[in-house]
Structure formats: structure tokens, C-alpha cells
Image (tube, helix red, strand yellow):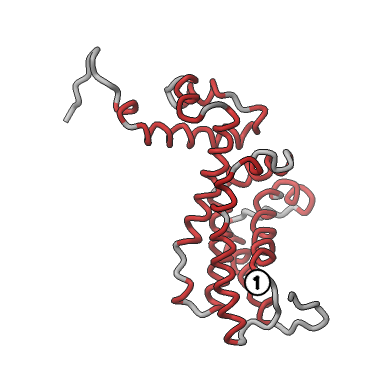
Amino acid sequence: MTTMSGPGTVPARQRDPERTRQDILDVAVKEFAARGYSGARVDEIAAKTRTTKRMIYYYFGGKEQLYIAVLEHAYSVARDAERRIDVDLLDPVAAIRRLAELTFDHHESHPDFIKIVAGENINNAEFIAKSKALAELNTPAVSVAARILERGYASGVFRRRVDAVDLHMMVSAFCYFRMSNRHTFGAIFGRDMLDPGRRDHYRAMIGELITSYLTGDSGAAPAFS
């Protein structure tokens, strides 16, 4: 069925503000990821969304506010995936492995997220620090890990103590490095870390690294207290 349009017809995009806002965010993510905060242009984002600069400012307030919204959106996608894990149905070892694999999958499938995080680190987290929502958005990443760790220590299966933030750092370090340093690593060592033939190997590696660390003998490593 064809929808008739005429001089008095309001375009569907204008009738659906949430869709318009999401379309702007989707394009802005790619623009900021490709060009960084200073290089991105609101005019270019407007052109690619077939809207206007004035409309973008109406929804977000300005370039800085749009960029912060992009950061919040990018992190919320990652956190939503973590919230969907029903860790209580898995034993602690399987649950922590699943969490590591989920981070691996997310980072691989969201290269723009990697670029945006890299840019924000270059800017010393200037814009992340201005977002009140981001601290709350990232709480699930820590709380899910904390729940798994608590069960693992209670059952005795986890022997080496670490807190949830440190665990998150360990997992993120491997998964983020694989994406962010792909080109330099490849140029130096001649190995593409995104080679499909090695994907399962790397995905299993992060799971084994984390579970082996937690379940192994702490030896001389100082325990977290």
C-alpha cells in the first residue's frame, strides 16, 4: 500500500521523534568514530540523516551534547548485552567464561565503539566525565561480575581473589587490544588478529586466561583483600 503525500503531509520521520533521534545517533556514532570529536561535523551528520543541523540541535542541544549522547549510546549497547546474561543458571566457571566471551563478541562486532573509546582516552575522558548517565550505565558490567565472583568464592571453585573492576579490566584489556592494535600488531608480527581462521582460538584464549587465573593456585601472587 502506497502512502499518499502532499503539501500538508507530515513526513513519517517528523512524526516519529524517537526514530529520528535514533537515526541521528546511528550516523553520529560512525562520524565521531571515523573523525573524532574535533574532526566530526554536525553538518555532515545532518546531511547523512536527511535532516537539518537545526533539528539535531533541537534533539541534542549542540555538538558536545550529541557526542556525549553517542558515548552513552555506545556504552549502553555493551551493557545491555551483559544484563541479559542469566548467570544464576550457570556454574561460576561457565558464567565467568561466558562474560569474557560476550565482551570478545561485542568488541569484535562494534569496531566504532573501539574507535570512540580510543578517542576519549586521547581526550583524557573529558566528555565521559561530563556524563552522569555513564557511571550508572557501567554499573552492570561490575555487578554481574561481582555476583559471579561471590558464588565462585563461596563454593571454593575460585581460589585467586580479585575484585570485579580488576576482572573487568583483565577481560577488556585482551578484547580491546585485539581490535585497537590490529594494524600495528599485524605490521610488526605479520599476524592479523582478526583473521577468521584464528577467531575461535582467540575467543577460547580469553575464556581460558580468566578461568585459569581464578581457579589456579595463587602462589606468590598477593591476594586482594
> Where is residue 179 shown, x and y percent of the image?
65, 51
Q: Residue shown at 66%/27% (left/top)?
A: 39
Disc 1 residue type?
Answer: Ile
Quadrant of residue 17 within the rendered picture: top left
Q: Name the residue under label 1.
A: 210
Examine the rendered structure and indicate whether residue 77 appears above or below residue 212: above
Give whichever of 17, 208 is nearer the camera.
17
- Say whether residue 38 is left or right of residue 54: right
Examine the rendered structure and indicate whether residue 39 appears above or below residue 78: above
Quadrant of residue 66 within the rendered picture: top right
Give whichever of 39, 140 is nearer the camera.
140
- Say whether residue 115 is left or right of residue 48: right
Outermost residue, front direction? 132
Q: Residue shown at 58%/45% (left/top)?
A: 132
Q: Residue shown at 74%/75% (left/top)?
A: 224
Q: In which quarter of the image is the N terminus?
A: top left
Examine the rendered structure and indicate whether residue 179 appears above or below residue 69: below
Looking at the image, how many numbered discs can be counted on the residues? 1
Give whichever of 18, 176 is nearer the camera.
18
> Where is residue 101 shown, x and y percent of the image?
56, 65
Outermost residue, right direction? 220
> Where is residue 26 shown, x and y percent of the image?
48, 37
Residue 115 visible in the snapshot: no
Quadrant of residue 155 within the rendered picture: bottom right
> Where is residue 113 shown, x and y percent of the image?
59, 45
Examine the rendered structure and indicate whether residue 56 appears above or below residue 202: above
Outermost residue, top direction? 7
Local packing at callout 1 (Cα closer than 10 Å; few below 14, some 14-19, many 20+) is some
| SS for dot 1 | helix
